Amino acid sequence: MTDPGAVEHGLFIGGKWVNPPGAGRFSTRNPATGEVLGHFVSARPSDVVAAIDAAQNAFPAWKETPAPKRGEILLRAAETLRGRKEAVGQVVTREMGKVIAEGRGDVQEAIDFIEYMAGEGRRLAGETVPSELHRKFCLTVRQPKGVVACITPWNFPTAIPNWKIAAALVCGNTVVFKPASNTALCAYEVVKVYEDAGLPPGVLNFVTGSGAIVGDALVGDPRVKAISFTGGVETGREVYLKGARQLKMVHLELGGKNPVIVMDDADLPLALEGVLFGAFGTSGQRCTATSRVVLHEKVYDQFLGMLVDRLKSFKVGDPIDPSTDMGPVASADQEKKVLEYIEIGQKEGAKLRTGGHKLTGGVYDLGHYIAPTIFETPHGTRISKEEIFGPVLSVIKVKDYDEAVHVANDVDYGLSSSIYTRDVNRAFRAIGDLEAGITYVNAPTIGAEVQLPFGGVKNTGNGGREAGSVAIEEFTEIKTVFIDFSARLQKAQIDPR
Ligand code: UN1
């Protein structure tokens, strides 16, 4: 475990930590205090090539390692991370800014998934199906793709890298991992866990630096067979296009504009807690964050009043303090973007009910703090339709269930969704009607569990899912096998039946 001081960390290539001479450096900072946490290498294309070489060289032996053995190493990694949960949770909070309970939760999600994937080493199931011919046996087996690139965001800086890395590894791929630059220390901790768990050299490689240089070099290298990317839509589209030129498998997890529908028969105190957690947990910086409340007119004034009231006692402050409800946003760039959206909301005539500004004075001056913000807006404004990725909630009035579903669906994204209602028939209808990869009933839009598929429709992605048992789809090729034990030539579709 590294003391998260401002230590210098290298790249991890072929099982060695290297500090290539001549490469630039960048630092990460605590968004709550401005404290510098670590220094990292701005890798150059030649460093990326070295990482891919190492992954390529390690691939044959890793592919030949029995999947249950690969799973055992993952299980050791899960145990190693469990032993470091508190320390790494603190690093998450200090580097990314989510409150400490969520920092620990981020690490727990990583542990859960690595453990889950370790079990996959004893499944990796194919199918056996009957043949149309006599004495012929048909089955499928899963094979690794080769070298895969995992490009990950800052908002779940230990969980999301592990969703990708653990699944890729158990399937027998070797990995080059490029994390978001502002959470490079968290990423370093992830890599250390695998190193300390005894992963063979070259199976996991780590390159830090910008998307424009490192990401681009990874995506453009023909030896990288698959790319798993979580991040913004614009970058995702670029990655997809660049990968498409080489017919690569590109898995994308992109944005969301997730609605909570609150119907007139909802348990309002329950919905209140759900909306607060969904909208302002992680300072609204989850792909799954609740960014819209689609609110039935009969409970509109009451529920909006409850929300605004409750925020008066909401504590925004240093996320390392366990009594803090909400920390800062993750970076100066985030702060700028969120404040811009608040301005857009005001310009387009949305009614600001609370928040709407940067917090200043005392500790606030050290970091990137934005007051939890609620706008009342008609459906159709930019703030009601575009992803903001910050503590800004749009409240939209609707007259009935049909209008609620229309509003909920009328956006470019479809990751998570939720309905609060006590009507079981309506809840089941919503499961069918809401255009999203995930629907919650009487729970907020955040908080997916690792043993279930995660992903969305529309601009949220390109059809794949992470997590759950389907996580292995992204990282395996299916080989179809026909074994003819009739000792004669049999012709499918031609021989008499
Ligand atoms: C994300 O924001 O991309 O469902 C991931 C959740 C978390 C994962 C969020 N388990 O909110």
Image (tube, helix red, strand yellow):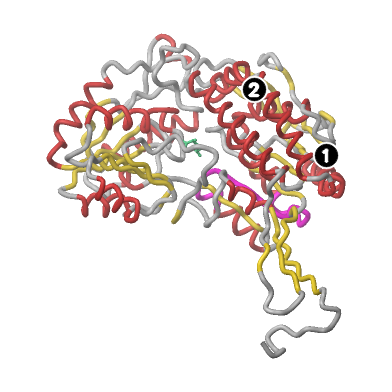
Name the image quarter holding residue 341.
top left
Identify which residue is drawn at 67% across, 21% down: 38
Residue 372, image x and y in percent? 33, 26
Q: Nearer the viewer, residue 221 or 408?
A: 408
Identify which residue is drawn at 31% across, 37% down: 442
Name the image quarter holding residue 264.
top left
Residue 238, image x and y in percent? 58, 54
Q: Nearer the viewer, mark 1 or mark 2?
A: 2
Crowding near the residue tagged with mark 1, few <14, some 14–19, many ≥20 C-alpha atoms within 10 Å: many
**Image quadrant for the C terminus?**
bottom right
* Amino acid at dot 2: Arg
Crowding near the residue tagged with mark 2, few <14, some 14–19, many ≥20 C-alpha atoms within 10 Å: some
* In the image, residue 215 above or below residue 369: below
Residue 131, image x and y in percent? 69, 74
Identify which residue is drawn at 70% across, 23% down: 80
* Amino acid at dot 1: Gly
Residue where numbered disc 2 is placed: 82
Q: Secondary structure at mark 1?
A: loop
Marks 1/2: CA–CA distance = 24 Å
- Is 286 colored magenta in this rendering? no
**Image quadrant for the N terminus?**
top right
Q: Nearer the viewer, residue 353 or 404?
A: 404
Residue 41 horizontal side relative to residue 258, left or right: right
Residue 354, image x and y in percent? 25, 26
**Magenta region, residue range:** 218-236
* In the image, residue 97 above or below residue 463: above
- Which callout, 1 or 2, points at the residue further toward the start of the chain? 2
Residue 146 horizontal side relative to residue 278, left or right: right
Q: Nearer the viewer, residue 365 or 404?
A: 404
Residue where numbered disc 1 is placed: 202
Can residue 123 be seen in the rendering of this structure? yes
* In the image, residue 143 above or below residue 46: below
